[in-house]
Amino acid sequence: MAQAKAYKNLIAGEWVQSSSGNTFDNHNPADQRELVGSFQDSTSEDVEKAVAAACEAYSQWRLTPAPKRGEILFRLGEILTHRKEEIARDMTREMGKILLETRGDVQEAIDMAYWMAGEGRRMYGHTTPSELRDKFNMSVRMPVGVCGIISPWNFPIAIPSWKMLPALVCGNTCVFKPASDAALTAVHFMEAFEEAGLPKGVANLVTGSGSHAGSALVEHKDVRVVSFTGSTSTGRIVAQRCARDFKKCNLEMGGKNAILVMEDANLELAVDGALWGGFGTSGQRCTASSRVIVHKNVYKKFVSDLVERTQKLRVGNGLDSETEMGPVVSEKQKESILQWLTIGQTEGARLLCGGRALEDGSYQHGHFIEPTIFGDVDPHMQIAQEEIFGPVVSVIPCSSFQEAIEIGNSVRYGLSAAIYTQDINQAFVAIREMNTGIVYVNAPTTGAEIHLPFGGTKETGNGHREAAEAALDVFSEWKAVYLDFSGHLQRAQID
């Protein structure tokens, strides 16, 4: 195969090598023989340089009129549109999900660019009457400073766009540390920023490990906002470190999302949703439909249909147009999922299909796992409580709508939930009662759109939301402004 390219960090508008002199390789998870690229193994010294560049650029970027900042983001959207297919194909090569999905990933970044471009002319504050006669009151958004952006590999351009674009339109500067398994997509994103005319140092890229580059970014004194998407265990550490310096901290973490299938559900539609929600991105989504809670009156039919459809899924290289589910991202992820498959069987769940790695023939050089369904799962089993992050679905029987709600809420996460029913009353009760940040009716637990807030409750997050107007709250501070035109002292609450 052709020699893969060595990619560099972007710091202060220059593509530079890491101070360590070391690189790491990124291989295609569908075929480990293909080297996608080599990337910089950055150190705290590289992070220091990137933060210094972001600090220097901040003084001018925050004074750039917000509509002008928005115009750059609009150009970014145009560039991503032009490069969509190229970026999508490279994304499939480096992290595995099928081309249909990687195109959607890029489209989400395009949508976000256009949305946030508009915020450059909106970014509304408030005007409100004063309690005094000759006084005018308003509030405005102010940028915070340098933002540390740490993103995962499963949505390697969509999620960074949720973070960086609102940060930039608010007038902040960024240092971006992507997941190592999706570093090439991050490079493409930064190249698009350059082409769009983003000034040097406003957005900087450092690749490398979380333990070195990521940790240095979180702990840097000049980083005033940290936005992190990843595991709950790592998010807890990020929150603790940010708390020491009173930094703003936005966390998007785990999920154990449930589809509720009621006895009046359109079963064909529910099976469609469970397939897409459970096995899209090989189950490697924080919003994956990893639990399906099914009313006992339709349980047998639903399970039979779901297993039949699952066994027909075509697993393979995501660049193949016939493939419906690609590999998992790495050997480490594959081994973790296989351990969960063993745990499920040990706990007594009934293995209905799948349950093993695919390693023969065309699968021998990749990280492939059969789409797997466990049936008759007790809601207290580990496989029904913990995030597996793989193509594994647990089907749980229930006797009533109320029991389905209770089971759905019985996990420590609260990201997304779904209900399939023809009863509008049940649907609205589920919307109210499910303790999650997102609820779908007659759709799976995945499929968020950028103009609504994204995030969850409990151990899924720390109260913030990404995307839409809500993202501006993470990357800006409110400033209240009082203008007294009375010509004499007026004392609020006194006069």
Image: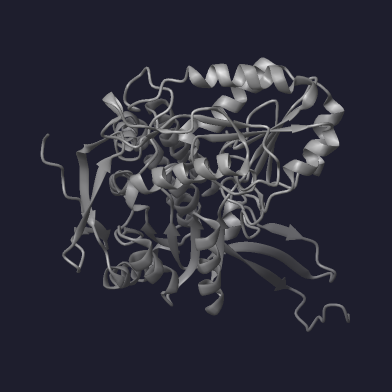
> How is the structure coloured here?
one colour
Query: Residue placed at 84% from the left, 30% from the top?
Result: 426
Q: Quadrant of the C terminus?
A: bottom right
Q: Relative to 142, does residue 96 appear above or below in the rendering?
A: above
Residue 124 locus on image (x, y percent): 63, 53
Apparent side of residue 334 relative to residue 464 in the rendered image (left or right): left
Residue drawn 31% across the image and 38% down it: 29
| Quadrant (top left/top right/bottom left/bottom right) for the N terminus | top left
Q: Position of residue 450 (x, y in %)?
A: 56, 39
| Position of 212 relative to 200 (above/below) | below
The residue under the point 65% across, 22% down is 303
Q: Taking 210 as reference, is 442 above or below it?
A: above
Q: Is residue 378 visible?
A: yes
Question: x and y percent of residue 361 in the render?
Answer: 27, 24
Residue at coordinates 57% horizontally, 59% vertically from top-left? Answer: 474
With respect to residue 101, does 387 lie above or below?
below
